[in-house]
Amino acid sequence: MITTEELSRLTHIPLKTLQGAMRQKGIPEEKKKITPEESRSILDGLSLSFKQKSITIAALKGGIGKTFLSSNLAIRLSMMGARVLIVDLDPEACATNSLLSQEQVESEEKKTILEVCKNLCTFEEAIWPTKYPLLDIMPSSLRVAKTERIVNLKNPKTLLRKSIEQCSYDFVFFELPPSFSTLSAAAYLASDEIIIPCTPNIHSLESVDLTVEAISEVAQEFECHHLEFKIILNMFNPKRTASQDTLTILRDEHADLLLPFCIPESADIQNAINSGLSVFEHRSKPQVREAIDLLVGSICSLKIGERSPHTSIPLTIPLEGDKSATEISATLQ
Ligand SMILES: Nc1ncnc2c1ncn2[C@@H]1O[C@H](COP(=O)(O)OP(=O)(O)O)[C@@H](O)[C@H]1O
Ligand SMILES: [Mg+2]
């Protein structure tokens, strides 16, 4: 569930316009919280849809928040009414274990990318619904580690991209282990955007450079020139020197890729994960929820349906002034 105020803030659609669309869809406009399906139908009523995007939260280092960020972004986007798919390619299967029920996790029916690559099932047949409406997952399990032997004979450029292009999700997130493989190369080549988390320590900084370098090499080799890189500083604590030093180095060395906000360090995040919830249901600190929402804003844009099919309105909250809010309000009036 999402509040109408939150949906208005995230989409830059004036609250009054949202309430008008709610009336038209028979949803009581005084309703404070709406379901993902209601949110989708409201946007639909305004002839708005999400601009499709596939994203990998990538790093050649573990424990820096890749899974936390991709699952919370995916959940939040689905709350806004987007159809979202997580393709779990990490044999550790942390996203799978937190998003599926115990019964689903243990089911013998469960298919993974291994069965897809062995042609034992189609890409779509391996996808399962999660406990969140509009959010699906291709599960993983330890046996996904065996996929490499099969996929290293295939072309990474088409391995995942073709399947993604054929499915109708608004957002696809690839969940990867912190190592380089043909399967991870296939995920990079099927992505529009790579978000690299960095935490306040020297090894994480090293991993940012290595990750950008490794992915750029793959993109160049396979002539994939559309990839957009972003870096996000996670676990930021303004009181710690290491946090401030890391921020200074990232600003000096990656000013063009660094997002203009950080994800704060917070015990709430661990507590939310332990309860199997996103930071939005767990009611974590507002700063944590706001930071995830800023990240949502940086990847999400809406396009206007029949009126102007090729116009997309960036919902990014830019550093200087927010023109997109006025732009979208003007278009919708
Ligand atoms: N901003 C944060 N503040 C505090 N703990 C965090 C934060 N981001 C991630 N964590 C914790 O760090 C650990 C590793 O996160 P995870 O997403 O599993 O990393 P990865 O997927 O990169 O291995 C988890 O226990 C998670 O709760
Ligand atoms: Mg992980």
Image (cartoon, rainbow, N blue to C red):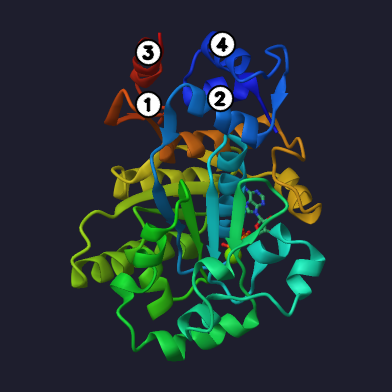
Question: How many numbered circles are shown?
Answer: 4
Can residue 63 be seen at all in this image of the molecule?
A: no
- Cα separation, mark 4 vs mark 2, equals 9 Å
Q: Which mark is residue 20?
A: 4
Can residue 300 be seen at all in this image of the molecule?
A: yes
Identify the secondary structure beneath mark 2.
helix
For marks 2 and 1, give the one nearer the viewer: 2
Which of the two discs, 2 and 3, labels the residue nearer the N terminus? 2
Q: Which mark is residue 42?
A: 2
Which of the two discs, 1 and 4, labels the residue nearer the N terminus? 4
Mark 1, residue position:
319
- Cα separation, mark 1 vs mark 3, equals 15 Å
- Cα separation, mark 3 vs mark 4, equals 18 Å
- Cα separation, mark 2 vs mark 1, equals 29 Å
Q: Which mark is residue 326?
A: 3
For this view, does 247 lie left or right of residue 89?
left
Instruction: Indicate whether 296 appears above or below 93.
Output: above
Q: Residues within 10 Å of mark 2 (few under 14, many from 20)?
A: many
Question: Residue at coordinates 49% horizontally, 56% vertically from top-left?
Answer: 173
Residue type at mark 2: give it: Ile
Residue type at mark 1: give it: Leu
For marks 2 and 3, give the one nearer the viewer: 2
| Residue 240 horizontal/vertical position (percent) | 59, 44
Which of the two discs, 3 and 4, labels the residue nearer the N terminus? 4
Q: Residues within 10 Å of mark 3 (few under 14, many from 20)?
A: few
